[in-house]
Image (tube, rainbow, N blue to C red):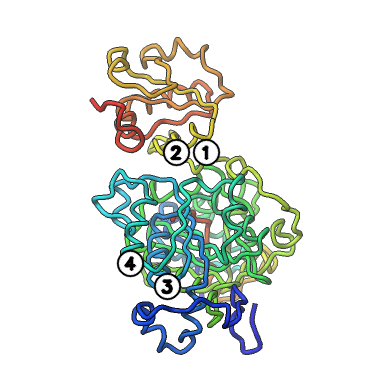
Amino acid sequence: MAISVVLPHALTPYSRGSSTLLIDEPCATVADALAAVAARLPALTDRVLTEQGELRRHVNVFVGEESIRFIDGLATTVADGATITIVPAVSGG
Amino acid sequence: MRDDDGNVRRVQASTADELPRLSPQEVLRYSRHLILPNVELAGQRRIKAARVLVVGAGGLGSPVALYLAAAGVGTLGLVDFDIVDVTNLHRQLLHGTKDVGRPKLDSALDRIRDTNPHVHVEPYETRLTSANALQILRDYDLVVDGTDNFATRYLTNDACVLLGKPNVYGSIFRFEGQASVFATADGPCYRCLIPEPPPPGMVPSCAEGGVLGVLPGMIGTIQAAEALKLILGVGDTLAGRLLLVNALTMDFRTMRLRRDPECPACGTRTIKELIDYDEYCGTPGGETHYDRDGVAEITPTELAARLRDGADLDLIDVREPGEWEVARLPGARLVPLGTLAASLATLDSAREIVVMCRSGQRSANAARQLQAAGFRKVRNLAGGILRWSAEVDPTVPRY
C-alpha cells in the first residue's frame, strides 16, 4: 500500500495540479516521504521545508490526525497506508 | 473547559437572576430557540447577556455578525476600517451594491439593525492595533477572528490569551477553510498551530489567489455556531481541534491540536504585552499584496489609515506635470517616470516609499525600477489616484 500526501489547493501549482500524491517508495518517516516528493516535485517541498531541511514554522504536517510537531517532527514514523496532510497557514477572511 | 456533564464551560458565569429578561417581541422572535433543547429560555437569556467582538466585517465577519445578531447576541462589537468595494460583494453579505464606497461599519450597522433591532452594536471604525486591542477586547466575553491578514491574527490571538478570552478562529483561501477555537482555559492558541508567520509573499492572500464566494459563508457560520456553543456552554467545541474544510471535495476533516508547552503566548507566557505585529510579520502597515510582477501594493484605504496614523512615507507621483495640475494627493511630490532614474539620489532607501500614478500602471513600472535599483521598501498605490478618489477622498478629481 502506498502513502498518501494530501495537499492544499494553494500548493497544487507546485504539484502539476494534483491534490493527492501517492508515494510507492518504501518510507519509514515523514522525512522519507517528503524526500520522495522532492525527487519528483522539488518546488513543492521548498514550500514545506526550509533550505536547511527543517519544517517551515507556518506549515503543519499531520500524520493521520496528529501534528508531527507533537510527535517526532520529520522523524515521525509513517505506516504503510498512512495519510500525510500538509496544511500551510492561510490568512484570508 | 468542561463541567461534570461533559459540556463546555460557559464563557459567562451569570446566575439566572442576573440574566436579562426577554420582551414579548423577543420571545416570539426566538421561539424556535426557546423550544430547542440545550437553548430554551435560560439559554436565550444567556445569548442576550453575551458580548461578542467580531474583528473584521468582511467575508467571515459578515455571516458571523449576521447569524449572531439574528440569534439574539445582546451586544455585538464590530471592528473594521475598510470601505465597501464592489469586489467585496460576491462574498461579504453584510454589504450591498448600494453600499459601495461607504464605510463597511455603516452598511454593517444598517444590515444588522434590519436583521435584529434588539441587538446593541458597538462599532470600532479603526484598525485593531497593539495600542487599542486590549482596551477594545477587554469588555467582551469572546472574540471572533474574521481578519484577513497574519499580523492582525497574531495580535488578536495574543490579546485573547493575555485577557483570557476565547478566540473563535476561521481562515479561508480559494476553496479551503479552517476553523478552531483558541485561547480557552486549557486549550491551544493560534501560536500553538502556527508558531511563526510565513515569510512575506510566500502565502498569497485572497486578493491575489481568489476565493470561492460561499466559502466564507461556510466557515463563518461554523464560527458563529462555535460562538453560540461557548455562550451556551453546550456541545463539544473545536477547542483542541482544527477543522479543515475543502469545498471542492466537500471533505470536512478534523485534526488534533495541542497546547505547545513552549508556546510563548499560552505555554511559557513570555509574551506579557502586545508587540509590533506588522514588524513581526514583515508587513509594514498590514498585509502586503503583490501584483503579478511581484511589486508590493498598498490599497488607498490602507494608505489613508497609515497617513492618519502619522506614518513617515515618501509619496512619489510619477505622472506628468500637466496631470499633477489636475489632481494630486496631499503630501505627494512629483517625479515624472521619465526622470525617475535621474532622481534616485533624492530618495532615501531607508524610508517607506509609495509610488502612484493615475491608475497604478506607470507607478508599477516605477516600483520595478526602484526595486531593481535596490530599494526594498517600495509599494505601489493599487488603482492609483482614480481609486483613491473613489474610495478615500472624492474631492480629488478623477480625470
Let me know if marks 1 and 4 both belong to one chain.
yes
Kind of residue indicated by mark 3? Gly
Given residues B223 and B164, the one toward you in this image is B164
Give the residue number, with chain letter if any, for mark 2: B302
Element under disc 2: helix
Query: Does residue B76 sit above or below B251 in this rendering?
Result: above
What is the C-alpha distance between the residues marked 1 and 3? 35 Å
Which chain is indicated by disc 1? B
Q: For the residues labelled 1 and 3, say whether their Cβ atoms are less than 8 Å apart.
A: no
- Could you tell which of marks 3 and 4 lies nearer the N-terminus? 3
Whether residue B303 sits left or right of residue B162 in the image: it is left
Query: Does residue B301 sit above or below B24 in this rendering?
Result: above
Given residues B6 and B193, the one toward you in this image is B6
Number of the label disc, if any, that sits on residue B189? none
Query: Does residue B77 sit above or below A79 in this rendering?
Result: above
What is the C-alpha distance between the residues marked 1 and 4? 34 Å
Residue in the image at 40% along x and 61% along y: A18
Element under disc 4: helix
Q: Residues within 10 Å of mark 3 (few under 14, many from 20)?
A: many
Kind of residue indicated by mark 4? Thr
Q: Which quadrant: the N terminus of chain B?
A: bottom right
Kind of residue indicated by mark 1? Gly
- Could you tell which of marks 2 and 3 lies nearer the N-terminus? 3
Give the residue number, with chain letter if any, for mark 1: B285
What is the C-alpha distance between the residues marked 2 and 1? 7 Å
Let me know if marks 2 and 1 both belong to one chain.
yes
Give the residue number, with chain letter if any, for mark 4: B115
Which chain is indicated by disc 4? B
Give the residue number, with chain letter if any, for mark 3: B72
What is the C-alpha distance between the residues marked 3 and 4? 10 Å
